Image (cartoon, rainbow, N blue to C red):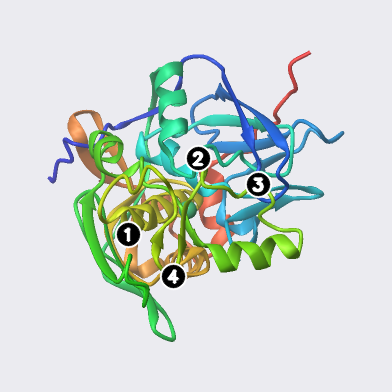
Amino acid sequence: MKTFSQISPYQSTIRKAVHISGVGLHSGDRIKMTLSPAGANSGIRFVRKDLDTNNPVPAFMNRVVDTTMATTISEGNASIATTEHLLAAINGLSIDNIIIEVDGPEVPIMDGSSAPFVNLLLDAGIRQQKSYRRLVKITREISFRDSDRHISIYPYDGFKVTAEINFTHDTINRQVYSVAVTPRKFVAEICRARTFGFLEDVKKLQENGLALGASLDNAVGMDQHGVLNREGLRYDNEFVRHKIVDIIGDMTLLGCPVLGHIVAYKSGHSQHLKLMETIAATPDAWEFVELKKGGQLSVLNKFVSRTKEAGNRFLPILAPVVHKRPV
Ligand SMILES: [Zn+2]
């Protein structure tokens, strides 16, 4: 029997509630966020504290309503934009269960990377739970192609991401980076990479009332000559490392960790969602597994015995838990 010693067999949450606030990329408004511990098997869920409804928004792919500039999820009238960098921190640190309360329509952008969220989660502390973690183990290649953009996932005894980007801009050009994702490597190599944008695009967006919070404090900005940020880049290949932040963040919406190697070429949020939907629609290309103590693998056939639509396949893992607002 295979062992997966680098992956904890147990689910985890955080030890205590922690708070952060920052500007929303789109609205430009100040947004407060609280992260709180959650019970085993309850998953990752957002709550819009500024709305009258208590309905949580599960961080799950069938709640995605927009992928144009960021990944936005929604339930009823509650939507939350720019989820990916926070979800990358949660996934990168192998946290399974957490409640995310925001008092506005987006997660604050902070410095444009995952690092502020990693620091916040580490401040809270990570607590191992008693329940075993369940994962999707890829058993043969699954691919999605969208003109010249493509993304695949291959069998791999762990979680690995290889990304390639190709821009005609001299500062970026072609960049490839590959990482076998563990919490240690996510923190050391990936989480600090910031989102990036071109000045002309940001100007156009702002003329249309979008990206009102965008600034050189929360993105790498570029014009035709190069990087505009006075401090320069955090890594020579910060751009492709940030692509990996986005992939890890978006893949969180599968609803459980995945054992596989993702290879992405020029992918964006829309292709990441399509890969998850293709995985869910290809049940003969993966197994639903549980890790036992010691990292041993057991296959949970009972969860995949019937072909169901994507949502129903994974949602039982996230047994609906009604989130009660603290009084
Ligand atoms: Zn991003």
Badge nearest the viewer, 4 or 2: 4
Looking at the image, is mark 2 or mark 1 earlier in the sequence?
2
Vertical side of 248 occupied by 225: above or below: below
Q: Vertical placement of 38 versus 65: above or below?
A: above
Classed neighbour count for the residue bearing mark 4: other residues with Cα under 10 Å, few (<14), some (14–19), many (≥20): few
Q: Which amino acid does label 2 sit on?
A: Leu
| Badge 4 amino acid | Gln
Return the x and y of residue 306 as percentages of the image width and height: 48, 63
Please report the residue visible at 36 percent of the width from the left and 34 percent of the height from the top: 93
Q: How far apart are marks 1 and 3 (CA)?
A: 23 Å
Amino acid tagged 3: Gly
Mark nearest the camera among 1 and 4 is 4
Residue 213 image label? 3
Q: Name the disc covering residue 240, or none.
A: 1
> Image quadrant of residue 122?
top left
Q: Name the residue under label 2.
A: 86
> Which amino acid type is shown beneath numbered disc 1?
Val
